[in-house]
């Protein structure tokens, strides 16, 4: 039996998390990993108990939905909520992180970001990742890996 790579395994987890997104503009998932073990996951959606974009529409200010918490931030906040350290961890994300998430990723001590799709890649985010010695790698997700379930 052929096994999928670790990168495809964790990227598949991020794509699965994105299916829980309540954002009507873009579904994003993020998985935080340490030592090849998943320590947290997140998707973009509203605060717990709050109104969701799929129910009430996006709340857009200056071209950004302010109702939604990004997947990367939700994953990092899950670690904070449950006392799980992020120092030295890695993050797998379905889309390139925005500038705000980039800064949160750096400050949380995550050392590598693997993303499946380009999405408004901010040159300053790339510069900040480089300054902070955060490895950034494009890892396209091969949806065919999910067909392995049908064997």
Image (spheres, grey):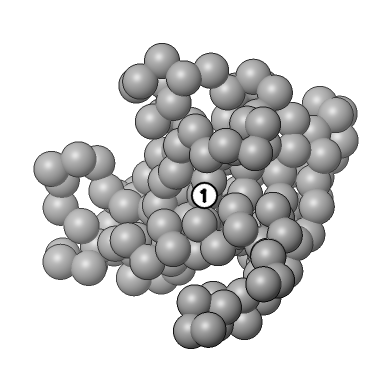
Q: Quickly name the residue at label 1.
A: 30
Q: Residues within 10 Å of mark 1 (few under 14, many from 20)?
A: many
Residue at 85% over, 29% down: 133
Residue at 52% over, 39% down: 38
Number of marks in the rendered image: 1
Image location (x, y in percent) of residue 4: 68, 65
Q: Residue furthest front?
A: 1
Residue at 48% over, 84% down: 150
Secondary structure, mark 1, is: strand
Is residue 56 among what the camera can see? yes
Front in this rendered view, residue 13 or 97:
13
Q: Quadrant of residue 109?
A: top right
Image location (x, y in percent) of residue 57: 22, 67
Image location (x, y in percent) of residue 61: 37, 54
The vertical placement of 59 against 126, above or below, is below
Image location (x, y in percent) of residue 25: 41, 70
Q: Quadrant of residue 48?
A: top left
The vertical placement of 114 against 36, above or below, is below
Q: Quadrant of residue 41?
A: top left
Is residue 70 among what the camera can see? no
Residue at 16% over, 65% down: 56
> Is 71 on the left-hand or right-hand side of 106?
left
Front in this rendered view, residue 93 or 149:
149
The quadrant of the rendering that contains the N terminus is bottom right
């Amino acid at each position: 039996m052929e096994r999928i790579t670790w990168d495809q395994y964790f990227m598949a987890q991020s794509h699965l998390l994105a299916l829980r997104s309540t954002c009507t503009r873009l579904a994003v998932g993020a998985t935080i990993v340490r030592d090849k073990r998943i320590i947290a996951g997140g998707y973009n959606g509203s605060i717990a108990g709050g109104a969701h974009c799929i129910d009430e529409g996006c709340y857009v200010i200056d071209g950004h939905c302010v109702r939604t918490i990004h997947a990367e931030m939700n994953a990092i906040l899950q670690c904070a909520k449950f006392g799980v350290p992020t120092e030295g961890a890695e993050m797998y994300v379905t889309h390139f992180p925005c500038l705000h998430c980039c800064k949160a990723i750096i400050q949380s001590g995550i050392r590598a970001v693997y993303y499946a799709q380009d999405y408004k890649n901010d040159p300053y985010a790339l510069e900040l990742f480089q300054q902070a010695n955060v490895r950034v790698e494009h890892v396209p997700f091969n949806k065919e890996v999910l067909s392995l379930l049908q064997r």
